[in-house]
Amino acid sequence: MKATTELPPEPLKTARRELGGTTVSYVMAIATFALFALFVVARQRQPFDLTTIEPYRNAIAAGFGRTIWVSLVALVASTTLGFIFYLLSTARVGYFRAFTDVFTEIIYGTPLLVMIMITAFVIGPAFGSTNRAAMGFLGLIVYITPYMTNIFRSAISSISSEQYMAMDLFGFTPFQRYRYIIVPQVVRILMPPLMNNFSLIIKGSALLNVLSYRELFYEVSLMTNNTFRFVEGFLLMWGLYLVITIPLSQLTKWIDRRWGI
Amino acid sequence: MKIELDRLSHSYDVEVLRDLTLSLDEYKALAIIGISGSGKSTLLRILSGLERPTAGAVRVNGHDVTSAEYRKQVGFVFQHHALFPHLTLLRNITLVLEKTRGYAPAAARARAMELLDLLHLADQAHKLPRNVSGGQAQRGSIARALSMDPEVVFLDEPTSALDPILTYEVLSAITELRDIGKGFVLVSHVMNFVSAFADYVIYMHEGRIAEHGAPSILDAPHSVELRDFMAKVPDCSFA
């Protein structure tokens, strides 16, 4: 049969062809950045020597631990506060809605560093607190709160009105609605942005070093000020942040694929 | 099925249904048609007990539509399937049966599979709504509506969110259900489906019933309004 040997007709518009497999492409991309890092290291005047970090290992590990610890506490606190603000933003009382609106505008317009300075040096003393690290930490929590409020709002509003009508029609009790339909959906929708905000907190916590809170950034700076080994110290620090944030973002994507709706 | 409207009026901010009175008996499939804003969806919601009329009385098969018992045995199919997106098609049905109708899990499962099979969805039972086509999801929601063992199934523009091929698929499935011994009340824009499926048609215009009768009124409208409507409505893909 002649027809089977003929080539299919040329499509009018050629679709964009993707070149290269995904895995290979990613390996190459990662290698590019690794090579760049090597190049940068090789260009330094001092030879690269990670053993210079050795005496500070415990201090840096402790700083790393504190970074994770404050981030976790800030995550829980800002999630809780964010939910309370979400409830306020849906309140019947106009003042509460306006309050959360104005609060959000102020925070969205403020750099995190400025927020931390204001809480530590201005608001804290006004309430008789001279514990700058604690006040700065509070600043971090307050700063993340409207972002948390936002994810609650979008997660909860993503349940369609038709679903509520269906629940109503089937005669689910209020408890059953939350237990079987609303909460399971909200949790699934909430997880990815919640993890992203966690990443935001971890990165933001580096700023607490300006208040002499002994987190990762502070401990590494302390070391580099003594040893002048900036290249080793800062690269290590960078790597340590990425070691937390990249798996976190990968986990987020995995959760979304696995549980997303 | 028996439908009685007695001086039914309904308003939100404006009046959407104006003093409707009608008595129907012995019809199996009632279609409500009309342009957007004519009050057809509101009438469907009131008939199904989803909304409480502001004035007048409505009875379906002798039940007051505002009573709690009536609502418990209504089957309603929404425009956008309204399946719970985090549950499989099967679980969408069994959850309702177990939690609100007191079925044991095994019995709920058997009943749900029977209905999914009726809608040709047995092989899709364990998929989430996002992983099936829009037509399959809509058929799943029809199966869920039937699980309430309703006397009357209400369908609110069940294909308005679907493309022509999926529309055909869903309307064929509904056609197959015609003789399962239930009443159907539907709002639809697919006129050749309405004339093939319904045995009574109500044409709504500006909150009133402008014309009603056997589906043959679609071919030979008496009122100016229905004539205009039929001239404008496009021929859709259901034959």
Image: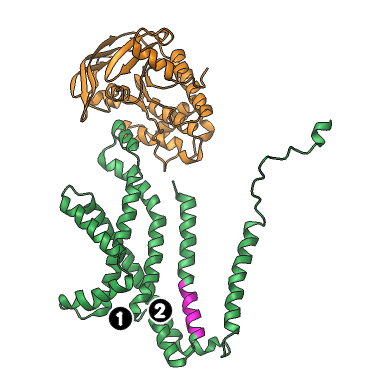
Q: Is residue B183 above or below residue A141?
A: above
Instruction: Give the x, y percent position of residue A145.
Output: 29, 62
Q: Is residue A76 left or right of residue A26?
A: left
Crowding around mark 2 (Cα neighbors within 10 Å: few <14, some 14 to 19, many 20+) is many
Which residue is pictured at 43% across the width and 16% down the height?
B231
Colour given to chain A in the rendered image? green
- The chain letter corresponding to orange is B
Q: How many labels were placed on the picture? A: 2
- Which residue of the protein is positioned furthest toward the right in this rendering? A1
Give the numbered dot on residue A133.
none
> Which residue is label 1 attached to?
A211
Give the residues drawn in magenta, as a range: A231-241
The secondary structure type at the circle numbered 2 is helix
Which residue is pictured at 46% across the width and 69% down the height?
A244
The amino acid marked with disc number 1 is Leu
* Chain for disc number 2: A
In the rendered image, the quadrant that contains the N terminus of chain B is top left
Q: Main secondary structure of the magenta part?
A: helix
Quadrant in which residue A124 is drawn = bottom left
* Chain for disc number 1: A
Q: Is residue A35 above or below residue B46?
A: below
Which residue is pictured at 36% across the width and 7% down the height?
B222
Depth check, mark 1 against mark 2: the one in front is 1
Q: Is residue A256 magenta?
A: no
Q: Earlier in the sequence, mark 1 or mark 2?
A: 1
For the residues labelled 1 and 2, the Cα–Cα distance comes to 13 Å
Instruction: Give the x, y percent position of residue A129.
Output: 18, 78
> Which residue is label 2 attached to?
A216
Q: Is residue A239 magenta?
A: yes
